[in-house]
């Protein structure tokens, strides 16, 4: 009965939340329908795994609503050969989705509990193309770049210049920038050695990336 209820909730999530929020890429819809989101949600909130809401995961952080995760995946248009950087592992669900789409994911989070738990779940799901690192992804540049895709899973006051420089030519960066309650989801594409194209793709409101410190490299 519980399994049936979860499956119905999963189907409704795709139909009622994602399709109505302009997620129309069939590749993304198939991906979220086949990735067991309930496994990444804390046990106490398992029944809310497919609800149109954010879910607390500890340390004052929240798992994004499913429709926002789907919009991120659609915007980034991840290809099988893409090398991906994720700033903010969180629950590990978006990490899993990106790993299933791309070649390799490096995911950073400042909370060891998050990277440890995500690692266990990813292993149980047979996902082995992810490198989980406990570090501040905005201040500690990691090896493995440049990256074809960069996803920032918490909001920023402004876009970090250092992140933009880690993109490959044609690489895409997704981030939410601005101040509560009016923030913009921005897709940045590198189009030249010192040129990036920025596109505001929708409005939203997302919690701040944890342990964010003032940095002069944050510019519009």
Image (cartoon, grey):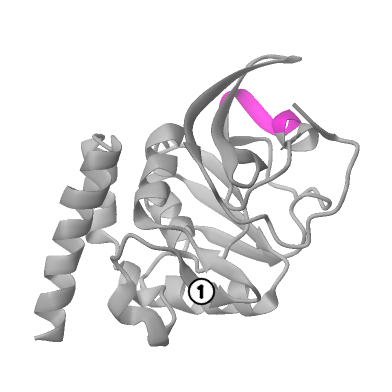
In the depicted view, which residue is nearer to us: 113 or 130? 113
* Direction from residue 163 to residue 203 in the image, left or right: left
Q: Residue at x 80, y 48 (%)?
A: 141
The residue positioned farthest toward the front in the image shown: 181
* Direction from residue 1 to residue 55 in the image, left or right: right
Q: Residue at x 26, y 35 (%)?
A: 25
Residue 182 percent coordinates (x, y): 58, 39
Please give the count of numbered marks on the rendered protein.
1
User: Is residue 92 at all visible to an observer of this figure?
Assistant: yes
Q: Quadrant of residue 208?
A: bottom right
Residue 172 percent coordinates (x, y): 55, 30
The residue positioned farthest toward the right in the image shown: 216
Residues packed near mark 1 inside 10 Å, few (<14), some (14 to 19) or many (20 plus): some
Magenta residues (range) = 164-171
Q: Secondary structure at mark 1?
A: strand
Q: Quadrant of residue 146?
A: top right
Q: Residue at x 29, y 62 (%)?
A: 35
* Screen quadrant of the N terminus: bottom left
Q: Which residue is mark 1?
A: 56
* Direction from residue 4 to residue 80 in the image, left or right: right
How would you classify the magenta stretch by its main secondary structure?
A: strand
* Residue 129 is a magenta residue: no
Is 20 rendered above or below residue 169? below
* Direction from residue 189 to residue 48 in the image, left or right: left
Residue 173 percent coordinates (x, y): 59, 34
């Amino acid at each position: 009965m519980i399994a049936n209820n979860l499956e119905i909730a999963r189907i409704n999530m795709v139909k009622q939340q994602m399709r109505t929020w302009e997620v129309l890429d069939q590749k993304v819809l198939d991906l979220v329908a086949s990735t067991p989101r309930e496994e990444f949600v804390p046990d106490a909130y398992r029944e809310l795994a497919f609800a149109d809401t954010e879910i607390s995961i500890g340390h004052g952080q929240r798992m994004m609503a499913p429709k926002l995760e789907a919009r991120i995946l659609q915007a980034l248009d991840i290809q099988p050969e893409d090398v991906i950087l994720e700033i903010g592992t969180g629950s590990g669900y978006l990490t899993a989705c990106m790993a299933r789409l791309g070649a390799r994911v490096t995911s950073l989070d400042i909370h060891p509990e998050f990277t440890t738990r995500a690692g266990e779940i990813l292993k149980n799901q047979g996902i082995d193309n992810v490198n989980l690192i406990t570090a501040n992804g905005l201040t500690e540049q990691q090896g493995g770049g440049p990256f074809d895709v960069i996803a920032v899973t918490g909001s920023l006051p402004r876009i970090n210049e250092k992140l933009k420089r880690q993109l490959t030519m044609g690489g895409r960066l997704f981030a939410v920038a601005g101040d509560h309650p009016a923030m913009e989801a921005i897709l940045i594409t590198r189009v030249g050695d010192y040129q990036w194209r920025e596109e505001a793709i929708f409005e939203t409101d997302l919690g701040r990336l944890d342990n964010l410190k003032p940095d002069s490299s944050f510019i519009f």
